[in-house]
Amino acid sequence: MVASFSASQAQALSIFKQPARIINMKDRNLDMLKKDILLTSPFRLLEQDIDTKISEGGFGTVLSRAGVGKTAFLVQLALYNMLQGNNVLHISLSDSVGKVGLRYKELFQNLTKHYNVQQINELWETTLPHRFIMTFRVDSFNVPRIEERLTDITEQGIFHPRMTIIDGLHFDESVRQSLVDLKALAMKHSFHVWFSITTHRHEDRNPDDMPPSLSHVADLFDVALDLQPEGKEIHIRALKSVSETSEHPPLFLDPSTMLIQEKK
């Protein structure tokens, strides 16, 4: 006896012939953990000011006096992007690769303690591939050299950054042409750039509250955030913003952990 099936029955039976989908529950749990951190991170509030998706070729900067927390802020911004699966190129002009890597590990550990994360090592292993560190001496830093090293890693398929951090660049009167060239490079390779800028306690600011180190190149920047120590907190203020309005609670760096927090 030959069995016959209707079209709907045949379609139903065909489902069982398809290869089974294997769901890795460990990876799924890590993805859910990343989403939980991103949904509760204070950076979700800063997105109203900085829109972490600054357009390709766009510039952002964080300013403060020496030792206040510029690098800690940039590393957390990098971690926030890395947890989203975005590649971050970190270029340091003052620290070694090992020292930069240690900053990431310390802040990541503080972050996971804050969120009471148990799978610290597993989460770190899935996040770390989204970071690449380069170092230059300040006196040997120039855009052609960056482009040469960037081309090396992109053409070999090693790393394609969506965001680049440049920490330690001197913003003197001669920096403008380098910034113009960097903007063209960022456009060419489809990423945006964040810088640290050092300010000084007694310098005069212009009517827009811009310090001299930024005011002469402010037209090249989309976002500028100022770190201001006030008592036991380091407040984060937007000097220049993507957003027209900022209605989120005030944000600050906690000096004990250097983590970004929001005022309750």
Image: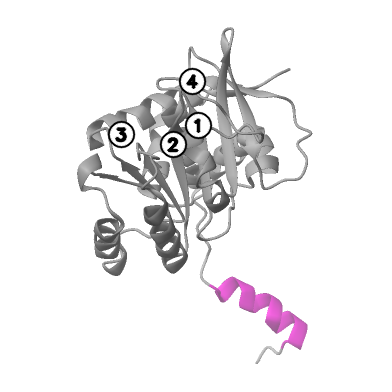
Separation of marks 4 and 1 at Cα, in angstroms: 15 Å
Q: Is mark 1 on a helix, strand or loop?
A: strand
Please indicate whether residue 170 sits to the left or right of residue 123 in the image. left
- Residue that mark 1 sits on: 63
| Residue 41 at least partly seen | no
> x%, y% of residue 172?
38, 40
Residue 17 on the magenta segment: yes
- The residue shown at (55%, 40%) is 34
Of circles 3 and 1, the one toward us is: 1
- Residue that mark 4 sits on: 258
The numbered mark, 4 or 3, whose residue comes first in the sequence reads 3
Indicate which disc residue 31 carries: none
Circles 2, 4 touching at the beta carbon (< 8 Å): no
Q: What residue type is labelled 2?
A: Ser
Indicate which disc residue 101 carries: 3
State the extent of the magenta-drawn residues as a range. Answer: 5-18
The numbered mark, 2 or 4, whose residue comes first in the sequence reads 2
> x%, y% of residue 142?
27, 53
Crowding at mark 1 (Cα within 10 Å: few <14, some 14-19, many 20+): many
Circles 2, 1 touching at the beta carbon (< 8 Å): yes
Separation of marks 4 and 3 at Cα, in angstroms: 16 Å
Please indicate whether residue 124 sits to the left or right of residue 97 in the image. right
Q: In this view, does 89 lie above or below 80?
A: below
- Residue that mark 2 sits on: 196
- The residue shown at (61%, 36%) is 43
> x%, y% of residue 219?
57, 51
